[in-house]
């Protein structure tokens, strides 16, 4: 079979490797789609991950069809459409230093347990949309970390894949209003398409003024005027986002950071003390990897909006280049015949 690997700093290749076979406790999946994550571009840039540096398999956002089932595996049948938990294998994380990646024609799910290492997704969900399961689990964990309650007013900064996934998650959690902030009109259009109640173009509008118009007025503990927003989500990773959130947060508002900040962000806690804000962070998906699967199944048309570019497997290297090029694409998915 063919698999996509890092061959050196900044270089990738498609390599022929033996097709695995399922043992008694394993499941063999014919991969049908794999999303490209920002971490894939990072692994390419550094030449892979030890001990497989120079030959690191890529891809951890996978969906496919079961073609072999071990005799001791329960609840899974040949022909099932499945999504993969990349952090489950004992042999190493799929596509992140382990011996396999989802950018492959086949993937061996070792010691397969339904609901732990893979989950079945309805056949009507397109494989490219199903492949969003892993990043949407990241988004769902961020939503869960905010403690959002029905009726809350939410603002999401950043209309990339995680921000859009979180927008869907907030609405499914009962948020009364979800406002999305971004600089790009095309991304804001997607935000409305997935269910945002309103959008703000921060290049053209004053965010604080618009949030107060949309969410009403709030105050700090000492009565200083603030926006009436209950939850702020940073899915953008720009210092101005946290500065804006902290400057506008009312008393007991929650600010959650799911974006990766590559440089330290200075925070003046003295200036925000009377807001008594709750600051939380969100990393990965401790329990959400398959919590989000049913949401995708039930609302796959909305999640499909998140995909910006699709590439065939033979163009996987170009897909990686496109995903790593700033501004070239939002969410790239490789489809595998």
Image: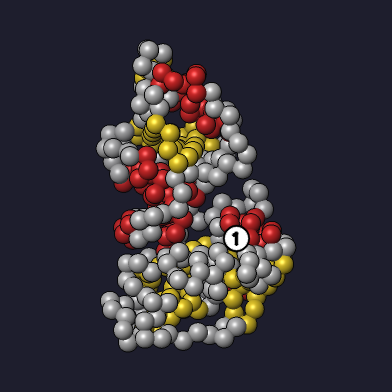
- Is any part of residue 263 visible from this angle? yes
- Image quadrant occupied by the N terminus: bottom right
At a point 42% along the width and 85% down the height, the residue shown is: 22
At a point 39% along the width and 31% down the height, the residue shown is: 278
Residue 28 coordinates in the image, percent (x, y): 43, 81
> On screen, 164 above or below 215?
below
Residue that carries the numbered disc 1 in the rendered image: 40
Image position of 259 (left or right of 213): right
Image position of 310 (left or right of 123): right
At a point 41% along the width and 45% down the height, the residue shown is: 142
Residue 257 coordinates in the image, percent (x, y): 48, 40
Dividing the picture into quarters, in which one does residue 16 lie?
bottom right
> On screen, 173 above or below 276?
below
- Is any part of residue 305 visible from this angle? no
Check disc 1: other Cα within 10 Å, few if <14, some if 14-19, many if 20+: many
> On screen, 6 above or below 24?
above
Image colouring: secondary structure
At a point 63% along the width and 66% down the height, the residue shown is: 50
| Depth check, front residue: 146 or 307 | 146
Residue 214 coordinates in the image, percent (x, y): 39, 26
Tag 1, which secondary structure? Answer: helix
Residue 53 coordinates in the image, percent (x, y): 66, 68
| Depth check, front residue: 269 or 144 | 269
Image position of 222 (left or right of 42): left
């Amino acid at each position: 079979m063919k698999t996509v690997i890092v061959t050196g700093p900044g270089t990738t290749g498609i390599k022929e490797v033996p097709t695995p076979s399922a043992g008694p406790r394993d499941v063999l999946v014919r991969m049908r789609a794999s999303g490209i994550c920002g971490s894939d571009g990072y692994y390419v840039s550094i030449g892979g991950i030890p001990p497989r540096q120079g030959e690191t398999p890529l891809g951890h956002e996978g969906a496919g069809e079961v073609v072999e089932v071990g005799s001791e595996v329960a609840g899974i049948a040949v022909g099932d459409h499945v999504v993969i938990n990349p952090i489950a294998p004992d042999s190493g994380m799929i596509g992140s230093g382990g011996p396999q990646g989802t950018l492959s024609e086949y993937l061996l799910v070792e010691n397969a347990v339904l609901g732990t290492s893979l989950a079945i997704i309805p056949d009507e969900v397109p494989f490219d949309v199903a492949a969003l399961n892993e990043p949407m689990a990241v988004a769902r964990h961020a939503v869960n970390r905010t403690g959002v309650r029905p009726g809350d007013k939410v603002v999401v900064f950043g209309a990339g894949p995680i921000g859009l996934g979180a927008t869907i998650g907030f609405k499914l959690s009962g948020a009364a209003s979800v406002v999305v902030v971004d600089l790009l009109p095309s991304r804001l259009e997607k935000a409305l398409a997935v269910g945002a109640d309103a959008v703000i173009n921060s290049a053209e509008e004053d965010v604080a003024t618009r949030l107060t118009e949309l969410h009403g007025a709030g105050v700090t503990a000492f009565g200083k005027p603030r926006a009436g927003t209950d939850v702020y989500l940073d899915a953008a990773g720009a210092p101005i986002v946290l500065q804006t959130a902290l400057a506008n947060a009312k008393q007991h508002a929650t600010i959650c950071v799911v974006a990766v900040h590559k440089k330290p962000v200075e925070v003046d806690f003295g200036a925000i003390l009377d807001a008594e804000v709750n600051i939380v962070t969100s990393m990965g998906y401790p329990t959400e990897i398959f919590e989000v699967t049913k949401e995708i199944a039930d609302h796959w048309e909305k999640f499909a909006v998140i995909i910006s570019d699709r590439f065939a497997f033979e163009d996987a290297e170009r897909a990686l280049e496109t995903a790593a090029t700033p501004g070239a694409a939002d969410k790239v998915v490789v489809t595998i015949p």
